[in-house]
Image (cartoon, rainbow, N blue to C red):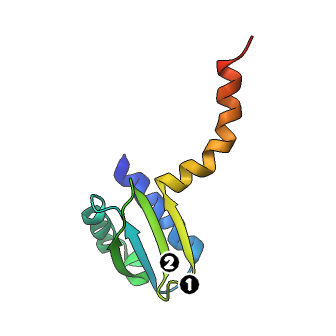
Amino acid sequence: SDQSSLAGLIKEAVSTLGLSQERLYVSPRDLPAVKKLIAQDKDLAARVVEVKEHKSSGGVIVEDIKGKVRIDNTYETRLEMLLPRLLPEVAQELFQA
């Protein structure tokens, strides 16, 4: 589901950053679900000190509290990372003789 994929993206980014105080940026439509997720997860509740809105189609941006280190796990950024790998496969399927 969209909720479990969002939870996975948040946990992945938070654990990658690995700090004790982190700020999350999520899309306005995901904000209530993210706040609920944090309230239900002791580890996230201990580490996430702030959740702000960010215009995106989904996913999350996690940064340290000083705003110096940032992990962009938004759907747009993940798609940008995947496209270069997928395009050759798509082209091969489309133009196979």
Tell me where residue 39 appears, x and y as whole percent.
29, 74
What residue is disc 1 on? 68
Tell me the residue that label 2 is attached to: 63
Of residues 43 and 87, which is closer to you in this image?
87
Q: Is residue 82 left or right of 59 when viewed as pictured?
A: right
Q: Nearer the viewer, residue 36 or 30?
A: 30
Q: Earlier in the sequence, mark 2 or mark 1?
A: 2
Residue sitting at 56 percent across and 84 percent down? 68
The x and y percentages for residue 66 are: 49, 89
What x and y, as percent, mark residue 3?
A: 35, 53
Specify the quadrant of the image occupied by residue 27. bottom left
Q: Is residue 47 above or below residue 27?
A: below
Of circles 2 and 1, which is in front? 1
Helix, strand or loop at disc 1? loop
Q: Which mark is residue 40?
A: none
Element assignment for label 2: strand
Is mark 2 in CB contact (under 8 Å) with mark 1? yes
* Residue sitting nearer the eye, 33 or 65: 65
At label 2, counting other C-alpha atoms closer than 10 Å, the crowd grade (few under 14, some 14-19, many 20 or more) is: many
What residue occupies the far right of the structure in this picture? 97
Q: Amino acid at mark 1?
A: Lys
Horizontal side of 3 relative to 75 (left or right) equals left
Dot 1, crowdedness within 10 Å: few (<14), some or many (≥20)?
Answer: few
Which image quarter: residue 95? top right
Quarter containing the C terminus: top right
